[in-house]
Amino acid sequence: MDKEKKPVTVFCQNLATTFSPAIMAVTLAGMSRDYIVEEGLFRLGGGLAFEGIIQLFIWSCVISALITVLTSDIWFSKIMFLWRVVALMLLSIAASVAFAVTFNWIPVGDWEAWAVFLVIFVVCFGGGLVTLVAKTKFEDIRYNKLLNDYKRRANND
C-alpha cells in the first residue's frame, strides 16, 4: 500500500473494487439461474433482493477490510507478502462461506453449487491476485526509476 494514502482511502478503494464485481457476478449468476435458490439472494421473479444487496455490501466491507489490513505495510511489514496473500485467501474463503451459509446464498447440502462456488472463488481470487502483483511490479519499476533519477541528480550536484 502506498504509505501516502490513508487506510480509510485504501479501504474505500478496495470496497469499490470489491462491491462492484460482486454485484456483477451475482447478476450474471442470477441470469444463468443454474445454482441459485429462490430463498437466498434472489426473490420473487428471480430478481436480486434488496436484502441481498445489503448482504453483499456488508460482505464487501469485510473483504475490503481484510485486503486493506493484510496488504498494508503499516500493520504487517515484517510478514512476507506470500503469507499475507495466503492469509487473505483463507480468510476470504472463510468469510464468504460464513456469509453463504448464514444468508442461505448457497444450499448447504448442494455439493455441486459449492463446487461451482469454489471454482468461481479461485478464478476470481486468482484474477485479483494477478492484478495486485502486476500493480506492485509496475509501482516497483516506477519507484526504482524515480530512485535512479534522484541518485543521478544527486551525483551531478
Image (cartoon, helix red, strand yellow):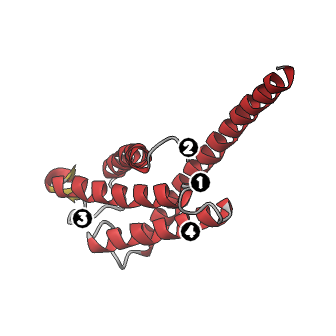
The residue under label 3 is 40
Q: Earlier in the sequence, mark 3 or mark 2?
A: 2
Between residue 124 and residue 149, name the one nearer to us.
149
User: Disc 4 marks which residue?
Assistant: 87
User: In 3D space, how far apart are the residues under numbered discs 1 and 2 (Cα atoms)?
Assistant: 22 Å
Name the amino acid, label 3: Gly
Mark 3 touching mark 2, by CB under 8 A? Answer: no
* Helix, strand or loop under label 1: helix
Place residue 34 in its image quadrant: bottom left
* Residue sitting farthest toward the top: 156
- The correct choice, above or below, for 6 with respect to 100 in the image is above
Badge 4 amino acid: Ala
Residue 10 horizontal/vertical position (percent):
44, 46
Neighbours of disc 2 within 10 Å: few (<14), some (14-19), many (20+): few
Q: Residue at x 65, y 64 (%)?
A: 78
Q: Quadrant of residue 157?
A: top right
CA–CA distance in space, label 1 to label 3: 26 Å
The image's mark for residue 24 is none
Q: Is 33 on the left or on the right of 119, as rendered?
A: left
Identity, as a three-letter code, of the amino acid under mark 1: Gly
Q: Which residue is mark 1?
A: 126
Q: Which secondary structure, mark 4? A: helix
Q: Are marks 1 and 3 in contact (CB under 8 Å)?
A: no
The residue tagged 2 is: 2
Across and down, in percent, residue 69 comes to 48, 60
